[in-house]
Image (cartoon, helix red, strand yellow):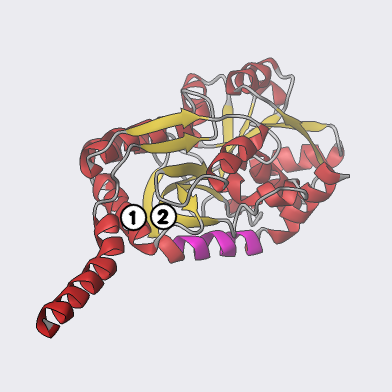
Amino acid sequence: MKLIYVRAVVLTAMVALGGPARSQEQYPSKPITLVAPQSPGTTLDILARLYADRLQKHLGQPVIVSNRPGAGGLIAAQAVAVAPADGLTLLIANSGHAILGTLNKSLPFDPVRDFAGISMIGETPALVVVPPSLGVRTVREFVALAKAKPGTINYASAGIGSATHLAGAYFSRQAGIDMLHIPYKLGSDILSDLIAGRVEVTFSPPAFTLPLLKEGKLLALGVSTAEAMREPIEVPSVRSAGINFDYSTWYGFLAPAKTPAAVLQKLSRAIADVSEDPELKAKVQVQGITPRSIALRDFDGYIGTEMDRLGPVLKDIGDKVNN
């Protein structure tokens, strides 16, 4: 009788200890929602759908893209921040996510501490893009014009707190010029106003302006990498003009901060695996994004380091927005 009792106790303990492990091994047991902070057809939406299709096959559950555009990514971020930390609601984001707290002092969540990095998937530089009608052909000429007419050069971005807003503000600081920020809701409006000369410059990922650059309707004066761009068009580095403009937009996946480590690890491995798919790689590169994998705590560390490096310009942006 005692032997039977001891076996029962041991069996009960094994079941209790094995329960959480088995539930994590079974993840995901339900469909996953991938929240995108931009509207359909934008870079983040395209990336979300590329990965959703492949992750669905890899994980054995539907991965549904939910577009929550607006407020510079705040709406999407809040939807994920308050979701259960079970790995079934994820966020695909870019650099703009990390500065939400700088722009919104009364947020009910912290865009850094309340999220856990799953995996960075790539990054893209910024191009300094102007219309030919502006009459400048180099970064030096552009900076000279801006210094001669302080506060009169308008730079267009995809909205307050967007990666293009940050890029423009950072360039202004590094070049020692004063420009006026013009936020837009639609990317197509930025392009039409640039061509018409209603705004003078934007600091955009290459894919956004590439067709118009190839047609000669817009000009790329410089790229925010240490080396010049050689493909698909040739663009000198901004650094070659004597300006330390080292900037890139990162793209990656985030989850609520309290998501179990085993779930984060499984997601990270799945994303790493599908990122190696040649067809996906090619489609990501068409968006002007260079694939780059940084996972879990290293991804969190990367975001923190970038925020520290860009601290002064983040403070400038926050002061202007909150005053």
Q: Is residue 41 above or below residue 267?
A: above
Observer able to see residue 172 = no
Residue 294: percent from the left, percent from the top?
Answer: 40, 59
Per the model, the C-alpha gap separating discs 1 and 2 is: 5 Å
> Total marks drawn?
2
Q: Is residue 118 above or below residue 3?
A: above
Placement of the C terminus among the 4 image quadrants = top right
User: Which residue is located at x 63 percent, y 59 percent?
Assistant: 307
Q: Name the residue that disc number 2 marks.
A: 118
Residue 53 sits in which quadrant?
A: top left
Q: Which residues are magenta?
A: 298-308
Residue 47: percent from the left, percent from the top?
Answer: 40, 35
User: Which residue is located at x 56 percent, y 42 percent?
Assistant: 126
Name the element at disc 1: helix
Q: Name the residue that disc number 1 marks.
A: 268
Instruction: Bin the neighbour count of mark 1 within 10 Å (Cα to Cα): few under 14, some 14-19, many 20 and up.
Output: many
Contact? badges 1 and 2 (CB < 8 Å): yes
